[in-house]
Each structure stands twice: as C-alpha cells, then as structure tokens.
Amino acid sequence: MNHLNFKNITTLDVRPILASGVDPLNVILNKVKELENGFVLKIINGFEPTPLIRLLNKQGFEAYVEKIDDFLVHTFFYKISDKALFVDTDLTPNLEVSTSDWESKLKVFENNIETLDVRNFEMPLPMHSILNALNNLSPNSALFVYHKRIPLFLLPELKEQNFSFLIKEISHTEVHLLIFKD
C-alpha cells in the first residue's frame, strides 16, 4: 500500500511526549486500538521506530516509513486484519522482584556479568544497543543494564529470544536490568 493512497489519517506527533521524558507507547497503542478498517495512524517522530513497527506487525498491522530528513520520520500504521491483537503494556506490576531474588541472581552471575549503560542514549539506541550486546553475550553470562526507564518495547523481544530478565526500579529515572538465559 502506497502512503499516497492513505485516507482517513489520524496524526500523532510523539516528539513532544519524548522531549518531556515520557515513553509514548501507551498513547500510541491507545490510538492504534481506536483505528477502524481503512484508517491509518501517522506517527511523527525524529527516528524510525523499529521496535514499535515490530511490535505492531505482530499485532496485525502493516507499517510504511517515510524519512523526511535526518530529524523527521513519518510512520504510517494500518490494519491488515480485523483480528488485530493488542499487547498488554501494563507490564510493570508483574516486574517487581524482591531484593533477595535480585541479589541471589547477581550472585549466580557474579563473575560473568557484562554491563551496559544506556541512560544517556536517545531512542531507539537503547534497545538496539541492548540487543546487540545480547547477541555478543558469552554463554552462562548475564547483561547488567543501567536504563532510565522500564523498556516496554524490549521486554516482548527478550521473551521471544528466550531471555529471562529481572528489573529493579531504583528511582523514577533509573532502572537496573539483569538479562540472562536460564
């Protein structure tokens, strides 16, 4: 489907949401849920939202990306099926780990932990960096990640690649992740 044929476009500029330090995932998914057949959601962003494209592809949506320039990307999402499913983005209550679970898992990997700090990276670089580090992770090792928020786009990808993870929320601007294979 060529974007020139798109009709009934709802536009969502996520740049102000990102600039405020908030992850726009819930806003985007709420807009996507409202889409009817023949309708398109146009996301305006400063980068190609590769993790979002993968996530929504799995939910029954196609995407068309139009790079306007180095700082402006339009991504169009449209239904390819009436049977689109929606991911549950309210994952955080299920991610709580006790301090003893966290500490015991750290001890398991204490001599085999690689670290990665993505707190100062702009999206989507944190996810890409984490996945790249996991691809190069030694067997029986874990990846310890310093992040500024719970990476909701990353979690389904980790599960799909058979990684386990623990998340420890240090503050509202700092999260630690321990990612490993059981």
Image: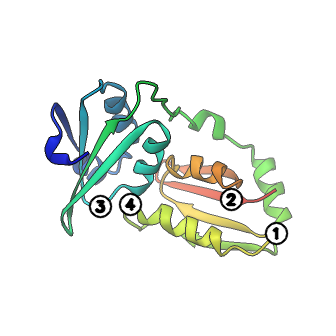
Residue located beneath label 1 in the image: 140
- Of the two numbered discs 3 and 4 on the same chain, state the one appearing first in sequence: 3
- Of the two numbered discs 1 and 2 on the same chain, state the one appearing first in sequence: 1
Q: Is residue 179 left or right of residue 85?
A: right
Q: Is residue 141 left or right of residue 151?
A: right
Determine whether label 3 and label 4 are within 8 Å by CB. Answer: yes
Determine whether label 2 and label 3 are within 8 Å by CB. Answer: no
Within 10 Å of the Cα at label 1, are there few (<14), some (14-19), or many (20+) other Cα atoms?
A: few
**Is disc 4 placed on a helix, strand or loop?**
loop
- Of the two numbered discs 3 and 1 on the same chain, state the one appearing first in sequence: 3
Q: Position of residue 35 (x, y in %)?
A: 30, 27
- Of the two numbered discs 4 and 1 on the same chain, state the one appearing first in sequence: 4
Q: Is residue 60 visible?
A: yes
Q: Nearer the viewer, mark 1 or mark 2?
A: 1
Q: Nearer the viewer, residue 55 or 17?
A: 55
Within 10 Å of the Cα at label 2, are there few (<14), some (14-19), or many (20+) other Cα atoms?
A: many
Calculate the distance from the C-alpha at mark 1 to the C-alpha at mark 2.
13 Å
Q: Amino acid at mark 2?
A: Leu
Residue located beneath label 3 in the image: 47
Q: Position of residue 36 (x, y in %)?
A: 29, 24
Residue at figure coordinates x 31%, y 41% from the top left:
77
Determine whether label 3 and label 1 are within 8 Å by CB. Answer: no
Q: Nearer the viewer, mark 4 or mark 2?
A: 4
Residue located beneath label 4 in the image: 123
Residue at figure coordinates x 45%, y 29% from the top left:
84
Q: Is residue 148 above or below residue 125?
A: above
Q: Nearer the viewer, residue 7 or 55?
A: 7
The quadrant of the image that shows the C terminus is: bottom right
Determine whether label 4 and label 2 are within 8 Å by CB. Answer: no
Q: Nearer the viewer, mark 3 or mark 4?
A: 3
Residue located beneath label 2 in the image: 178
Q: Amino acid at mark 4?
A: Met
